Image: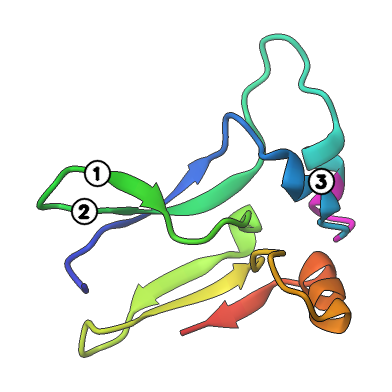
């Protein structure tokens, strides 16, 4: 896995489900209509499979752009990611509320 490139890319089509994120640093960029000619402003992590050439999202969630970082663990078996939001597909209301408002560090 450590040889799998991780890319932080701009999201061109923001999923409507992401409008539930309520972090004040992210929410305006998700709900604000883009001005004609302006580029995307929300980012997320993508994994590139070097064997197949396919690229797909690491999580169904945005990242926080300039405050996010990632690194493969020394043994290459896991990825450490900071400053990312988590998907909102949970049933526990307290967990969901926390995910709507905060970024996390993952391993």
| Residue occupied by mark 1 | 54
Q: Residue furthest front?
A: 91
User: Do the residues under discs 1 and 3 have CB atoms within 8 angstroms?
Assistant: no
Marks 3 and 2, how far apart in space?
Answer: 29 Å
Range of residues picked out in magenta: 23-27
Q: Which residue is mark 2?
A: 49
Q: Locate the N terminus and report the quarter of the image it occupies.
A: bottom left
Q: Which callout, 1 or 3, points at the residue further toward the start of the chain?
A: 3
Mark toward the start of the polypeptide (2 vs 1): 2
Taking the view exactly as shown, the residue that stands out farthest to the left is 51
32 is higher (above) or lower (below) than 19: above
Residue 91 falls in image quadrant: bottom right
Q: Is residue 67 left or right of residue 74?
A: right
Q: Residue furthest top?
A: 36
Inter-mark Cα distance, 2 to 1? 5 Å
| x and y, in percent, of residue 104 in the image | 65, 77
Q: Disc 3 designates what residue? A: 19
Q: Is 42 part of what is drawn in magenta? A: no
Q: Secondary structure at mark 2?
A: loop
Look at 84% across and 53% down and name the residue there: 20
Q: Crowdedness of circle 3 by 10 Å Cα count: few (<14), some, many (20+)?
A: some
**Residue 83 drawn at (x, y percent):** 62, 70
Give above or below for 18 relative to 71. above
From the viewer's side, name the closer residue of 99 and 79. 99
Residue 26 located within the stretch drawn in magenta: yes
Q: Are marks 2 and 1 in contact (CB under 8 Å)?
A: yes
In percent of width and height, residue 63 lies at: 61, 58
In space, the residues marked 1 and 3 are separated at their CA atoms by 27 Å
How many numbered circles does the render carry? 3
SS type, badge 3: helix
The secondary structure making up most of the magenta span is loop
């Amino acid at each position: 896995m450590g040889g799998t490139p991780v890319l932080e890319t701009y999201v061109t089509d923001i999923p409507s489900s992401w409008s539930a994120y309520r972090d004040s640093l992210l929410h305006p960029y998700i709900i604000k209509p883009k001005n004609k000619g302006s580029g995307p402003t929300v980012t997320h992590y993508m994994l590139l499979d070097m064997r197949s050439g396919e690229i797909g999202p690491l999580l169904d969630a945005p990242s926080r752009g300039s405050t996010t970082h990632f690194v493969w663990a020394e043994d290459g078996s896991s990825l450490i990611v900071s400053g990312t939001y988590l998907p909102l597909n949970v049933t526990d209301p307290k967990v969901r509320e926390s995910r709507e408002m905060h970024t996390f560090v993952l391993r």
